[in-house]
Amino acid sequence: MNAPPDQPLNPAALAFLVEQTAPLEAGSVTVGHDGAIARREPRGPIRFGFRFAGRTFEAEARPDADALLVEFTTEIGTLPYSVENRVLRSRLLRVLAGLRGTGLEWELSPRQGVRVGGRTRLTTPAIATRIVTAVVTALLPVKAYFDLLDEVLTPPPADDAEATG
């Protein structure tokens, strides 16, 4: 079997994978500079990103006791000071207050940037599909909050009739 020129055949990698028990947990395999694959104990965090509800999330999965803790956050926008836009500030703070009890939390940066995120835990084996399923299961019930945040931060333009009349 000939591999295409842009995809070199790595018999050592195939041999390694054949000898492993499935499933391979996220973070349990490392690839060396020479392309050699080796098993390693998952100990450090696994950083990844994904998109949900039109937003880009940053995530980190790391071992925690006998489970995997996955934390995820996204930038929502900027909370204006009252002097800048009192109405928008009030609306945004009301929506953010509504996040209590949803499993999501929000934080404010020194420059008024708002980040929203959450965390979920899953038992091993921590394979990629289980990690994605856990994150989606945590986010799907609160998707409406992201839609509401978008609506508050980017309201639709006023109708021409309202603007002139």
Image (tube, rainbow, N blue to C red):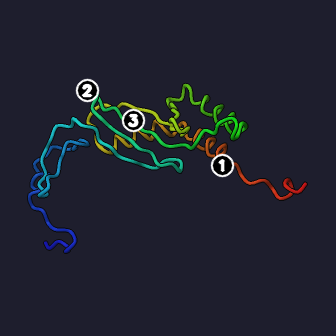
| 99 shown above or below 48 | above
Give the alpha-carbon distance from disc 1 to disc 3, as whole Å.
Answer: 27 Å
Q: Quadrant of the C terminus?
A: bottom right
Q: Which mark is residue 3?
A: none
Mark with earlier residue (2, 1)? 2
Q: Which residue position is annotated with label 3?
A: 71
- Please tell me how crowded label 1 is: few (under 14), some (14-19), or many (20+) other residues with Cα within 10 Å: few
> Which mark is in front, 2 or 1?
1
User: Can residue 14 be seen by looking at this rendering?
Assistant: no
User: Residue at left 24%, top 37%?
Assistant: 44
Dividing the picture into quadrants, the one containing residue 7 is bottom left
Q: Are marks 3 and 2 in contact (CB under 8 Å)?
A: no
> Which mark is in front, 1 or 3?
1
- Please tell me how crowded label 2 is: few (under 14), some (14-19), or many (20+) other residues with Cα within 10 Å: few
Q: Which residue position is annotated with label 1?
A: 154
Q: Which residue position is annotated with label 2?
A: 66
Mark with earlier residue (3, 2)? 2
| 60 shown above or below 105 | below
| 153 shown above or below 104 | below
Which structural element holds mark 1? loop
Residue 160: x percent and y percent? Answer: 83, 59
- Please tell me how crowded label 3 is: few (under 14), some (14-19), or many (20+) other residues with Cα within 10 Å: some
Q: Quadrant of the N terminus?
A: bottom left
User: Residue at left 53%, top 39%?
Assistant: 111
From the viewer's perspective, is 90 left or right of 75? Answer: right
Give the alpha-carbon distance from disc 3 to disc 2, as whole Å.
Answer: 16 Å
From the viewer's perspective, is 38 left or right of 81? Answer: left
Q: Name which residue type carries label 3.
A: Glu
Give the alpha-carbon distance from disc 2 to disc 1, as whole Å.
Answer: 43 Å
Residue 116: x percent and y percent? Answer: 51, 37
User: Can residue 116 be seen by looking at this rendering?
Assistant: yes
